[in-house]
Image: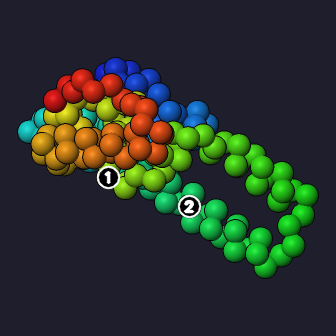
Amino acid sequence: MPPDLFDAHFAEIHRYIARRLSEDVADDLAAEVFVAALQSAYDPAIGAVRPWLYGIATHLVARHRRAEIRRWKAISRAAERDSAGHEDEVLDRVTAARFTGPLAGALAGLKRRDRDVVLLVALGGLSHAEVGQALGIPPGTVGSRLSRARKQLRRALGDVNPLKEDSDG
């Protein structure tokens, strides 16, 4: 990994993660992206470094979300066993407020692989080829996943186009 890679890409990777999760989480995960990049020794034969870093970031975001889902399910099971106290009610309200909104609900309804494609295009600004490289899939598959996701998002949002129809790929 070139020494200036961190300086050249940290802010962009951090912004992508923050838009998918939160600023607080992005601080740690963005750093983890570059630790993972150092440990896995970038091979120029796989393509450009930017999509490679986005691929690592997407993987870490998915891992974080799986852990978060396990944690929330555990809290939910505990809440079912115990009577909810005031602290639990406040926590539930804060969590609900954070995850409300039609777009968040529509994105949550997508399959993970389709959601990753949408978010890499919308938040990362990657082209179809770059998304394909980041996720290890052909650009044509990126296009079909993006098209399917757009249709599902439009339906979920009342026939509103959440992403512009222009494609980069």
In the rendered structure, which disc, 2 or 1, sits on the residue that comes first in sequence? 2
Asked if residue 136 is positioned above or below residue 12 in the image, the reply reads below
Q: Nearer the viewer, residue 133 or 153?
A: 153
Looking at the image, which residue sits at the far bottom? 81
Q: Nearer the viewer, residue 50 or 160?
A: 160
Q: Can residue 135 be seen in this view?
A: yes
Asked if residue 78 is positioned above or below residue 34 in the image, the reply reads below
**Distance Cα–Cα, label 2 vs label 1:** 17 Å
Mark 1 lies on residue: 113
The spot of residue 166 in percent (x, y) is 24, 23
Q: What element carries label 1?
A: helix
Q: Nearer the viewer, residue 108 or 4?
A: 108
**Disc 2 packing (10 Å; few <14; some 14–19; many ≥20):** few
Q: Nearer the viewer, residue 134 or 31?
A: 134
Question: Would residue 75 be found to the left or right of residue 3 on screen?
Answer: right
- On the rendered image, what quadrant is the C terminus found in? top left
- Amino acid residing under circle 2: Ile
Question: Would residue 98 be found to the left or right of residue 93 on screen?
Answer: left
Q: Is residue 2 visible?
A: no
Mark identifier at residue 69: 2
Q: What element carries label 2?
A: helix
Q: Which residue is drawn at 21% across and 27% down?
A: 167
Q: In which quarter of the image is residue 111?
A: bottom left
- Amino acid residing under circle 1: Arg
Q: Residue at x 32, y 32 (%)?
A: 121
The spot of residue 155 in percent (x, y) is 41, 44
Asked if residue 133 is positioned above or below residue 70 in the image, the reply reads above
Q: Do the residues labelled 2 and 1 touch (CB within 8 Å)?
A: no
Looking at the image, which residue sits at the far front? 159
